[in-house]
Image (cartoon, grey):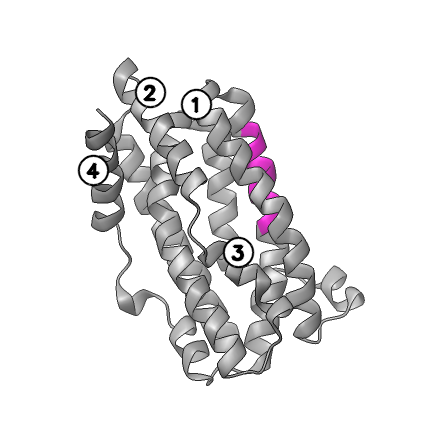
Amino acid sequence: MTHTTRQLLERTTRELAPDPGSNPLVPLIARGEAGRSALAALALEQRWVIPADRRAFLHLAERSDPEPAAYFTALAEGEALAAEHLKTFTAACGVDETRADTYAPLPGCQTYPAYVAWLALNAGPSDVVLALAANFSAWGGYCATIAQALRTRYGFADESCAFFDFFAEPAPALDEAATQAVRTALDRGTLNESRARQYAHALQTYEAMFWATLGEHT
C-alpha cells in the first residue's frame, strides 16, 4: 500500500502541475527584471497569507484523525518559522512597520488563503492533505527560483532569502507525514480522490491568480 500511496501522490502532483505561462512574475524575478516594488509587494502579501494559512492548518489539525493531524501540525509549525524569516525579507525590501501595517492586500492575492480557510471549515482533512501535497510542489519550485535570483540578480544576503530557502528545501519528514495520512485514509476507505483533485485544482488556480495579480499591480 505504501507504494500505491506514493504513486497516488506523485501522479496527482504531476497531473496538476501548473502551466508554465500561468506565473508571469517569477520569470521576471529570475531574470532580474522585476522591480524592487514587486519584491516588496510579494513580501506584503505574504504577511497576510502566512498567518491565515497557519490558523487554517491548526483548525484542520483539530478536526483530524491523528495521521492528518500530524501533517497539519507540522505545516502550522512551518508557517510560524516562515513568518520570522518573512520579517527579514520584508525589511530587506525596504518596507518599514508603518507601511506594512497600513498595507491593503490585493483581493486576487488573498483568494488562495481564503480558499484554504474554506477547506479548513468544510473539507475532509485527508482530502485536503492530498490537495495540499500536490500544490506545494509548484510553490517550492517558485521559491527556489526566487531565492537564487535574490542572491544573483538583486544582491540580497543569505538571511534575507531564508523565507524562500525554507519552502524550497526538501522536507522528507513532511512528505512522510503526508504519505502516512493518505495511506491511512486509503486503508480506511475515507479518501475521496475525486474531491481531493477538485480541491488541488482550485488551489493551483488560486495560486496562479496570486502571481497574476501581483504581476498586474507591480
**Magenta segment, prevailing SS (helix, strand or loop):** helix
Q: Secondary structure at mark 3?
A: helix
Give the amino acid at mark 1. Glu
Give the number of marks.
Answer: 4
Identity of the residue drawn at 63% across and 63% down: 44
Q: Which residues are magenta?
A: 50-59
Q: Earlier in the sequence, mark 2 or mark 4?
A: 4
Q: Secondary structure at mark 2?
A: helix
Instruction: Estimate the x, y position of residue 151 in percent, counting from the top left.
Output: 53, 78
Residue indicated by mark 2: 184
Instruction: Estimate the x, y position of residue 74 in percent, counting from the top left.
Output: 53, 36
* Contact flag, marks 1 and 2 (Cβ < 8 Å): yes
Residue indicated by mark 3: 166
Give the amino acid at mark 3. Phe
Please tell me how crowded label 1 is: few (under 14), some (14-19), or many (20+) other residues with Cα within 10 Å: many
How far apart in space, not on screen, are marks 1 and 4 (Cα)?
Answer: 19 Å
Q: State left or right for residue 13 relative to residue 84.
A: left
How far apart in space, not on screen, are marks 2 and 4 (Cα)?
Answer: 15 Å
Q: Secondary structure at mark 1?
A: helix
Q: Earlier in the sequence, mark 1 or mark 3?
A: 1
Quarter of the image for the N terminus: give it: top left
How far apart in space, not on screen, are marks 1 and 2 (Cα)?
Answer: 7 Å
Instruction: Estimate the x, y position of residue 80 in percent, counting from the top left.
Output: 64, 45
